[in-house]
Image: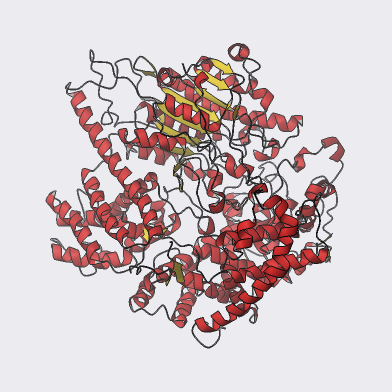
Amino acid sequence: MALLLIGASPWISAAEEDAELKQLRQQAEGVFKKDVAPFVREFCMECHGNRRTKGGINFEPALKAPGGASASKKWPKAFANVNAHDMPPEKADQPNDEERERFLDGLASLKYLSERDPGPFVIRRLTKMEYGNTLHDLLGVDASVADELPDEVAGAGYLNSLSPMQTEQYLSIANAALDQVLGPADHPVKTLPASLRSGASETEPISREQAEKWVRHFGRSAFRRPVTDEEVATLLRVYDLGISHKLTPMAALRLMVKAVLVSPQFLFITPAQTVAKGQKIVPLDDYQLAARLSYLLWATLPDAELAALADAGKLQDPAVLRAQTQRLLEDPRSRALFDGFGAQWLRLGELKDKLFDAAKFPQMTDALRLAMYDEARCFFDRLVRENLGVEELLSGKTTFLNAPLAAHYGVAGVKGSEMQPVVLRDARRGGLLGMAGILAATSFPNRTSPVKRGVWVLEQLLGEQVPPAPPNVPALEKQDQKKVAHLTLRQRTELHRTDPVCANCHKILDPIGFGLENFDAIGQWRDVDDGGGKIDAAGVLPSGETFATPQDLKALLTSRRDDVARNLVEQLLGYALCRQLGGYDEVVVDQLMRGLEGEGYRMKDLITAVVTSYPFRHRRIAE
Amino acid sequence: MFNSSRLNRRACLKGLGASLGLPLLETMGWADAVKGRAAYKPPVRLGFMYMPHGVIMDQFWPKSPQSFLKDPPPALKSLRPVLDQCLMMKGISGVPISPFNGAPHALELSTWLTASLPDAAKRNEIHIAISADQIFANFYGALTALPSLELATMPQTHKENQEGLNEGYYSHCSFRSPTQAMPAEINPRSVLNRLFGQTGTAGAEVRADPLDRQMLDLVIGGAKDLRKRLPHGDQQKLDEYLDSVRSVERRIAAIEQRQREAALEKAGLAPSKRAATDSPPIEIRIPEGDKRSEYMEVMCDLNILAFQTDTTRVSTYIGSTPNGVSYPELGFSDLHHSPTHHNNEPEKVRKVAAITAFNIAQFATMVKKMAAIQEGNGSLLDHSIMMWGSGLEDGNKHTRENLPFILAGRGGGSLNTGRFLPDVKGNQGDLLTTLLGCAGVPLDRPIGIATKEIGEMRA
């Protein structure tokens, strides 16, 4: 199994990297002066400069500090708009093709103007899923004890905040969990359950000294780092509070555990060390790094082995960090990576509660929905486990089916409700684009949406930014019904492209979606569409490549594995860092891509590269 | 991209279709009324209920001030019995959303109660403004067991990135601070627990353990120690934590206080808040199925009960989020968003009108119940301001010049109801500023884009 090796040294040495970056930065400065700044002055400043800020965009600050944080947010927008020929607007002076090309190329190098920076960082609260799993691992209660917490989005869109309602729920969940483990407050268990014993007396009475020893041990797991003396003192004050209210020692201990479970050190991943004044960027300490790793891959706290390595200060050693990543990925708990990251990336999370027209699709049962989700989950899991190349996401012939899903696909011989590996002989299936879950998630309740599917392929697979629809654009249903009655969905959608406002984007989006029209809104194969017209799945990509069938389209997209891999790296990095990427992150991604390319972007290597990357291991101290 | 969602089945109780009794109201201040005591003046309550995507204008706006009561427009049919207790105004504009022109739906909900736009430079984080309900909660929240109540029908997990805005803007209307979105409850069972403790079984007690309060106090002390050794950005995060724990502490203290008062009331040593003529608390029935109307009704009932028992005085209910839900009960499976771009095509217009009427009917059911609940010298509705509204006027064109909304209740005598004001000049901030004024919240600065109060609303 190929381990990821970036040079012989542990990390790329700082000096080596700095020298390379310095050179790239100088080049970028030249390109900026020659190709970017003059273009902006000539074509953009009339509306987006001086005192004019049309559409909220003003390039003056960006021209002054092209590598600054605010500029790095503007350049990608400029790229998208100029690339799509949306800007400069039609009535304004137009650059010639060469000027446009040079500007776009120039923008791509501006990332090297950014300073080396791990990006904004702030201590993070556990997500609902992480919190439930952590309680499970810590106390042995079922993770569903956390069900009453509000559902939330993990990763880049995570709302890292805390409301009174959540805090109150934490308190009530702590009560419920402790009722299960230690019995009710007024009638606690006589002896600690074996899983919680560790150093404390097995029977009452628990002495204060035993309570102290015990909570140091328990707190090490719960806080995912050693408990400071100050923290122990606080917790013992809670114990004493219980004793002074005539609680039994066990009940006082219970109150102390409750205090642990509503403490910020438990609810947030907090550093073990104080940052010295004046430091701007610091490496994460071993404990934070261990927690970051296990919450990413397992959605729970570090296990004993990982915790021991953190205690021993070994995680700054890249070989150790890589080995732990491998180990965690091989553990069944790593399904959390799909449930958390994969489902969100592929937009499968919403499939469970998505409504389908019951009259049209009576076969869309809960069992079938679950099988659709599990197919993608098992498929992803296998690619990671076997460290296969990223193009397998599109071309993989081995998938996982159970009886209901096999029937849905028309595959014979699969029995039972368990998902089982099946090598597909039907070339129309295989890979994400032939998966019912993906095809259904990108449809409307009662029909397919070539546009949604096109956007999905571009954004979720290839990582391209599709500009939002301009305001006041008629949706498909709005078209004159008499005029369009005799047209197929494809022909109706193509009307979009006769409108110049729509055409620029839809000539990119639509062909991809049409190429998948052989799959209906729940992913069944069909040769005619709802109106009875024969499906025409042929099309031309903007690059000029043509395809006649979904299989052709799949092959074309598979050949873009560099883009697929880069997008996956970016999506995973954003998820792991719980923020949107920008600025120096692009340089980081470039480096990761170079390291992965030679081996064909293998999945496990790719994940390992992300968790050993500079921004994953460092934090910026906010000024 | 719009995705439809089924009603979350988990939100409804499995196999618990039976009604739940409310055994503990005695401890919540519902001791028997004592006759002949000085009258207690009920406080003003403020409730907000939301529907996205706008309305069909000619079915929503009354034809004239004169016809408002006699011949209300079709969308308001369900409100007819209580229209004399409603106030409608045309001419309140929403927040102009430039520079976020590509995000009309991401912002319709989050600008609704803030009357503000996100900070463009920090658009990928939550950075907007405290919302009107939370300003109210800051002022009155300490007097009730819950500072505020946030309810929603759908989980707030929509993931779509418009104009680089944080996804949270899509599905939140309530902001405790500029950087902190308030999550909403979607499970009626949890709401019931939260309002009244563990009441699954008859005779259960509210859990308000004074020891918990003291324990939290010690935890706060420990958190302050931690705070000292964290960098500035982390400290701000911890301040959110401290704020939320203090609010739980206060809540426990408020329950203790109510329990003491109730004991005194019961012993005849203190006047009861409850008049002899007051209605008993309404009954909560948690539905078995996943019918949207039944689900919304129980959420509204919980809101009523929270107000009636003075457990909280301010609420928000996101009836649905702009990420597209469908209404199978109405006989079609289209996502709400799809037909709103109707281009005046009759079939689509009919669907949007039906969805609007459905949502207003849920609101009407709630305010009609409130009008029937006796409280002090009037009804619960008399002492409340309930606002139903949308963040767009015309979903077809994404306009927001005349935000559609309905006010119900006299706000303790502060609102002059039974009227339609066809040409009010003002914006969403002016409206919210005036509503808070009517609810007795003294503001030191206007809300969002407000420039004035709307005097015509007042009684």
- Please give left or right for residue B27 compared with residue B451 in the image: left
Q: Is residue B285 above or below residue B324?
A: above
Q: On the image, which quarter does residue A393 sit in?
A: bottom right
Whether residue A141 is visible to the viewer of this picture, yes or no, is: no
Residue beneath the point at 21% across and 70% down: A199
Q: Where's residue A453, x and y in %?
A: 71, 55
Protein image colouring: secondary structure
- Please give left or right for residue A264 compared with residue A96 in the image: left
Q: Where's residue A415, x and y in %?
A: 61, 62
Q: On the image, which quarter does residue B385 sit in?
A: top left
Q: Where's residue A111, x and y in %?
A: 62, 69
Out of B262 and A385, give the one closest to the viewer.
B262
Q: Where's residue B317, x and y in %?
A: 49, 35
Residue beneath the point at 50% across and 48% down: B127
Out of A504 and A569, give the one closest to the viewer.
A504
Q: Is residue B232 above or below residue B79?
A: below
Residue beneath the point at 44% across and 65% down: A295
